[in-house]
Amino acid sequence: MDGLSPVYSHAEVYDAFYEGRDRPYEAEEASRSRMMAKHVKERNASASSLLDVACGTGRNLGYFAEAFEHVEGMDLSEDMLRVAGKRLPGVPLHRGDMQDFHLDRRFDAITCLFSSIAYLDDAEQLNTAMRCFGRHLNPGGVIVLEPWYLPEKVQAGRVTSDVVTINGQTIARVSHTVLEGRVFRMDAHFVVADSETGIQHFTDLHLLTMFTRQEYETAVAEAGVASVEFVETGQGGPGLFIGVKPS
């Protein structure tokens, strides 16, 4: 994970783009977060604390705060954390690398969503990250990991486009995806326009490693969990890997 994609330094644009797309974004994210919380509670009914790794601008963390007494977030992007701090005053937020972070407490649940784990370069980095997760997990704690699509399910060679207008700002994104060995590469161009600042343009690059199911299962086991299960999430999603640390 050599660096952040440029869009993660444009946190307001990121937030507005996904909020403004023609679909019930807030309702979908609330439903997703409740589903994640349900998976945790089914495996640890007394779970009261949660760490969301790669928390971004904190949308999901806000919903997790409804289900857990204590929540914290961590992300590599200062700009994403800045917006998350505005959204979630009083919630502890940490800047850190998922492979090597050191917080002063353990948690009953750790989540890592939106395929953020796939920004790691190889299985060694994946294993290192999961060992770090495990060190921050209480006995009986639950890891919920949303992977990138498994190699047999990845679709590349696609062009997609979206234009949204929200709060007086218009954002256009055009993206193209290709496969480069074990890496899914997405190049995107953003054009952002509003009446005050005019038009700005930036390019974005995402390199997502296509780990196998066995690599994910081996890595989650590195966190010290007793067993790892894969849960289908439907609606074309990549599924979840869930592990529980023995109590």
Image: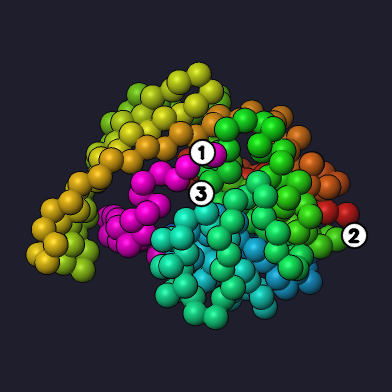
Q: Is residue 116 left or right of residue 175?
A: right
Q: CA distance from mark 1 to mark 2?
A: 36 Å
For label 1, the residue is 2
Q: State how the image is colored.
A: rainbow
Q: CA distance from mark 1 to mark 3?
A: 19 Å
For label 3, the residue is 114
Q: Is residue 17 visible?
A: yes
The mark that comes first in sequence, 3 or 2, is 3
Front residue of this view, candidates 230 and 7: 7
The quarter of the image holding the N terminus is top right
Q: Is residue 235 left or right of residue 139?
A: left
**Mark 1: amino acid:** Asp
Name the element at disc 3: loop
Q: In the figure, residue 214 lies in which quadrant?
A: top right
Q: Which mark is residue 247?
A: 2
Q: In the figure, residue 152 lies in which quadrant?
A: top right
**Residue drawn 56% across and 76% down?**
91
Residue 79 placement (x, y as % from top left)? 41, 61
**Residue drawn 20% across and 46% down?**
201
Q: CA distance from mark 3 to mark 2?
A: 28 Å
Chain part drawn in magenta: 1-27
Does the magenta segment cover residue 108?
no
How many neighbours does mark 1 have within 10 angstroms: few (below 14), some (14-19), or many (20 or more)?
few
Name the element at disc 1: loop
Front label number (1 vs 3): 1
The mark that comes first in sequence, 1 or 2, is 1
